[in-house]
Amino acid sequence: MIKETVAYAKKAEREIIFDAEHFFDGYKANKDYAIKCLKAAEGAGADVLCLCDTNGGTLAFEVQKIVTEVKPQFKTPLGIHAHNDSECAVSVSGMAVFCGCTQVQGTINGYGERCGNANLCSIIPILKLKLGIDCVTDAQLKRLTEISRHVAEIANLPQSAHQPFVGRSAFSHKGGIHVSAVTKHPGTYEHIKPELVGNERRVTISELSGVSNLLVKAEEYGVNLKKESPETKTLIKTLKEMENQGYSFEEGEASFELLVKRALGDFTPFFELEEFNIKTAKEGEKGTQSVAHLKIKVKNKNFDAAGEGDGPVNALDSALRKVLENLYPALKTMKLTDYKVRVLNSEAGTAARVRVIIESADEKDVWNTVGVSTNVIEASWLALVDSIEYKLMSEGKK
Ligand SMILES: [Zn+2]
């Protein structure tokens, strides 16, 4: 069957990649038969013989042994097709290439059935930067992070922050000692230069014990802080207080940037809240509806607005937008993409302090803001306001 099928397709002048499904398990069970299958495909003119680890159970050392045995028996180029069921698809693919395979089958971000296929976003930089195989140009490699995020967006899946090479946290550092070490000797905590794959170093703000974190972070925002200056000391004090209250700037970086700019008097708020009033009701058979009334001040003028929504936060957002979108049309491109609530001191039951994290996005950018309060609506409001202020501040910069 293999011989007839390959020969038929070859007669139609097509390129034939023969996927030897279950090859590694087949080889372990019956070496001769597995080799005969490949020989049949080669004899009929296949262009590539691809060795498949169809159930994803093969480990890299087994692939090394098997490919080393198989390779000398064929003139036709070999390929590798690995699945990630043992979380080894990348290492299996890299090993196969190391042992002489010249085609790798995989997917962007490792998307695929079950636990996924081999992740090309890791394999490509491993081949290029670690095995010295010129499989893509330097310029193409620099677009890897962008491609990974773009495909994630099309698939409507969040890109994992911890994805090697291309994830947002792949080159992020926290803790004073790490940060000062990595700026002096990047190799201490970075295995490659993030720019090579189009990613970037990030310093995350958690436990701001070290001043060095704050200084490096502020520099990213174009703010030049001096180590001993009174502003820096006040800022550290404020940050510690806020962290004690339950703020986590690691998950709300945009709020942190605003906080630094506010503390330095570098920021004029785009609007101020005078009061809000929210009613949430369930009437009869209808679902729960919320209505929010707002009084805000923009550029010294007072505005009233009302908005409806599926819940109180949605209603606040829609009331706020009724006023602000007229004054700042750029807000129309922004939407809230995620909303998370975490209870901070759960022993206090429903009176506990909560942290709200809001993720927002426009066509270009994604940003996170944070609010903390004993009242979930107030915490949401704080995160919502930061989210909008951040968008307007970014527009201002443009
Ligand atoms: Zn497969």
Image (cartoon, helix red, strand yellow):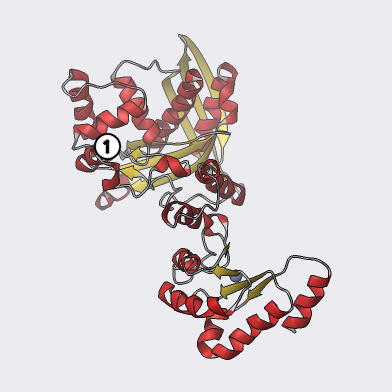
Count of numbered badges drawn on the protein: 1
Residue of label 1 = 183
Please tell me which residue lies in front, 354 or 157: 157
Mark 1 close to ligand 1, CB under 8 Å: no
The residue located at (81%, 66%) in the rendering is 13
Seen in the picture, residue 317 relative to 341 is either above or below; the reply is: above
Q: Is residue 299 above or below residue 275?
A: above
Quadrant of the snapshot with the N terminus: bottom right
Could you tell me which residue is drawn at 23 percent across and 25 percent down? 235
Would residue 150 be found to the left or right of residue 372 on screen?
A: right
Amino acid type shown at disc 1: Thr
Using the image as rendered, state which of residue 395 and residue 371 is in the foreground.
Answer: 395
Name the image quarter holding residue 236: top left
Quarter of the rendering containing residue 200: top left
Residue 214 drawn above or below residue 114: above
Residue 282 screen position, x and y as percent: 54, 45
Q: Is residue 241 visible?
A: no
Q: Is residue 59 above or below residue 239?
A: below
Front residue of this view, candidates 305 and 171: 171
Q: Give me the residue at 34% from left, 43% from top.
A: 172
Q: Element type at marker 1?
A: helix
Q: Residues within 10 Å of mark 1 (few under 14, many from 20)?
A: few
Q: Position of residue 188 (x, y in %)?
A: 26, 47
The outermost residue toward the top is: 300
**Is 285 situated left or right of 266 in this image?**
right
| Pick the front one: 51 or 67 | 67
